[in-house]
Image (cartoon, grey):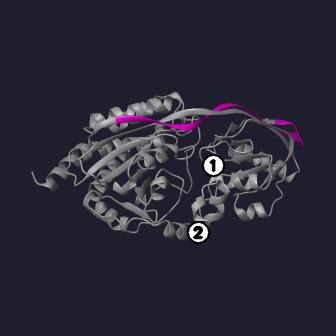
Amino acid sequence: MTEDTRVDAALGRAWRDDVPWQVLTALTELDDRLAGHEGEARAAELAGRAFADAGARDATVETFDLPVWTRGDCALAVTDPVERDFPAFALPYSPAGDVADASLVDVGHGTEDDFQDADVEGAVVLASTDSPADGRLVHRMEKYGYAVGGGAAGFVFYNHKDGQLPPTGALRFGREGEIPAAGVSKETGAWLREYADRDGRVGFSVDASTDSGTGKNVHAVLGPDTDEEVLALAHHDAHDVAEGALDNGCGVATLVAAARVLADLDLDCKVRVATVGAEEVGLLGSAALADRVDSKSVRAVVNVDGAGRYRTLRAFTHGTDAFADVLDGVSERANRPIEVEPTLHPYSDHWPFLRRGVPAVQLHSVTPERGRGWGHTPADTRDKADSRNLREHGALAALLVRELTSRDVPRPEDGRLRETLAGAGMRPGMEAAGVWPADWD
């Protein structure tokens, strides 16, 4: 059997494979995959079994330390010009706190310019999940950081999508935030913005705790036992307000689908497949994995965060232009589209490896619109997923990984990463979020 015939046979089997959907189902049946909680540990063990069943060897579950955040009650009430209670979710790493009486200040998209035009000292800040249509995506952590820097007493993050869906999302990377924070729906946000325009006031409290604990990673290997390796990973943790189907159950299922294809192919070097915990609260699992492996031996990282969600695969090359040619070749070989973007950002599990000089590509999906969509809301449920996308993106991911086992991809340099991020106007926001590397100053 020729290698092309072997590849075609593996892809044909992948298209009929029900296992990726079974993996997604098992993940979304868990009660809670929030970092450091029981469901996250069970997700790691589930992924390890799926890798072993795929034919990977040496499946290993490892623990790492992290601050474990636990949700309590959250209360939000307008006290003037009317008295009204509104539903709200505390945001992960919000400290416990009580704001008895504060003004409301709406900062819209929450950009640096928006905050410069607002006096937020002592106020509860309202910021949208949306970003300016003519600008880059502004991360939640940036908006929160600007609120903290401006002396705000609290932070309320309101959805820009209909459906009574309060959003969630961590406030800091791996540490408790400075001021209480919560997410509210678009509909609640509309009322709060109106009350802000009417010089309204609000009472706001969060009950939550942050304690020392552990998360779990799992990894296994495929292919020959070489010194060099290609690492493909996805995060198995999710927020506790929903099933975490799209973010990132689909990514884990896609990676399992890829592993099942790779097990049937000839590979030119070792491939390590891994799922990591605590991505949603600061990339802590991937940072622990990056500390464990020898970064100099990792030829490339394929971060499967967002793949499998929607029909067309999208790849972010994160400053490594050479990935574009590889991805074009994969697209042509599979006769499937892959949208390639040179986007570079620090908010997913490729980042700890990029910082160590490892070229990394992130596999995502072409979304119906900008932003997270159902992600980070109670609507992130399995019914939004499609088994065809898991199978197809898994096959494409496998072809990409296979190609990278025989390619030399240029390694990124801190200087170039720094210049690219600064040139894109991201430094102020990353500094506000607390993720601009200290050794870059």
Instruction: Quadrant for the C terminus, please.
Output: bottom right
CA distance for labels 2 and 1:
30 Å
Q: Is residue 186 above or below residue 357?
A: above
Residue lying furthest left = 1
- Residue at x 83%, y 50% (from the top left corner): 196
Residue numbers of the magenta segment: 60-84
Q: Amino acid at mark 2?
A: Ala
* Image quadrant where residue 220 sits: top left
Nearer to the camera, 262 or 67: 67
Nearer to the camera, 331 or 437: 437
Find numbered disc 1 in the image and state the secondary structure of the residue it sits on.
Answer: loop
Residue 335 at x, y percent in the picture: 28, 59
Residue 68 highlighted magenta (yes or no): yes
Is 41 on the left-hand or right-hand side of 100?
left
Q: Main secondary structure of the magenta part?
A: strand
**Viewer can see residue 18:** no
Mark 2 or mark 1, which has the lower sequence index?
A: 1
Residue 52 at x, y percent in the picture: 29, 35
Q: Is residue 59 above or below residue 174?
A: above
Number of numbered discs? 2
Nearer to the camera, 414 or 433: 414
- Where is mark 2, residue-wise? 422
- Residue at x 33%, y 49% (from the top left corner): 392
Residue 283 at x, y percent in the picture: 52, 47
- Residue at x 26%, y 41% (from the top left corner): 16
Q: Nearer the viewer, mark 2 or mark 1?
A: 2
Residue 75 at x, y percent in the picture: 76, 34
Find numbered disc 2 in the image and state the secondary structure of the residue it sits on.
Answer: helix
Q: Are marks 2 and 1 in contact (CB under 8 Å)?
A: no
**Viewer can see residue 36:** yes
Q: Which mark is residue 161?
A: 1
